[in-house]
Amino acid sequence: MQVLNLFADHPDRRWTLTGVAEALGLTKATCLGILGVLTDAGFATRDDAKTYGLGPALLRLGWAAETGLASLDVVRPHMARLYDRVGMPCVLVSVHQDHLVVVDRIGPIGPADQRDLVGDRFPFTPPLGLVNVAWADDATVDAWLARTPLAPIGVGEETTRDLVRAARAQGYLVERRVGAAGTPNVLLANLIGSDLPPAVVKELLGHLPPTDWSEYVRELPADDAAEIDLWCVCAPVYDRRGHQRYTLTLMGDTTPVPAGEIRARAAELVAAAQAASASLGARPN
């Protein structure tokens, strides 16, 4: 197990027998026996230069683990610990078949919360889904931006990309409360998920004010005492391929929150998201 973990932590490196022994503090004789068994089983490879690395048999194990293990069960404990530490409701969202899907939540979203939320689905189409694509690769961002918007967007693509870059730089993204609905995206999602006839929904979508991303806080005030009407803080959870698998969100409450406290909560959120990512096999940045 130590040898396999060593190889997994350095997948681009080839190891000599001496290098493996020194890295693990084992004798060369012990390592030689282990490497021989791993190579025979296809879990390691040995080339003509007598160096070792990961073997093709591990692909089968990785695929079996990824498909046979419910990744949500791996992430949920980190989400529960975050809720216990911070005391704020947590929501976990994934992108599945061009839809945003609420896959889990802990804690009530407001005092009048009557909805379970889990299982709710919304189109993964601008302006919905910015936080679910912000930490994805550029090609995914491009594909999302290329979709016909559900509602008018009042800023150019470069403004959106600037916001994405800001989110990537700090590792999280803060949304402030805007209006009674919370944010424009919440209003949009509630409209799409309503029981109104599709024709009525389509007509109403055309009358929504253009999105300008003003609900997102690109940078928290330097003054820790400055208060923000916090709606939520979002951070990415990555899978073993480095893809944004989930978006983990801490929900705010109805009272303004000092910037210093938001920074502290964001740090807890990012730590939980990174721990969840590690549990899914993601390598640290």
Image (tube, rainbow, N blue to C red):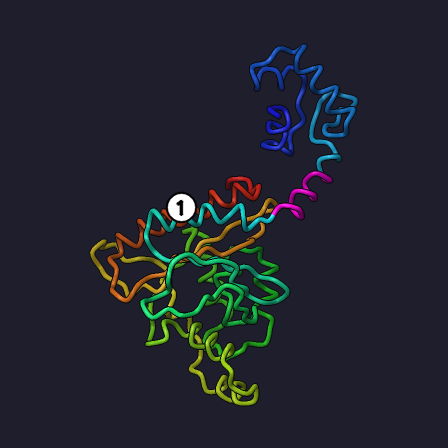
- Observer able to see residue 261: yes
Quarter of the image that includes the N terminus: top right
Q: Nearer the viewer, residue 146 or 45?
A: 45
Q: Nearer the viewer, residue 48 or 252?
A: 252
Residue 228 % position (x, y): 27, 63
- What secondary structure predominates along the stretch shown in magenta? helix
- The residue lying at 51 percent from left, 48 percent from top is 75
Query: Is 61 part of what is drawn in magenta?
Result: yes
Query: Vertical placement of 145 versus 172: above or below?
Result: below
| Residue under numbered circle 1 | 81
Give the mark count.
1
Q: Residue furthest left?
A: 225
Q: Nearer the viewer, residue 220 or 240?
A: 240
- Please state the extent of the stretch shown in magenta in the rendering: 59-69
Task: Name which quarter of the figure residue 222 lies in.
Answer: bottom left
The kind of residue tagged 1 is Arg
- The residue lying at 38 percent from left, 72 percent from top is 183
Query: Is 98 part of what is drawn in magenta?
Result: no
- The residue lying at 60 percent from left, 27 percent from top is 6
Query: Vertical placement of 268 versus 132: above or below?
Result: above
Residue 15 % position (x, y): 66, 23
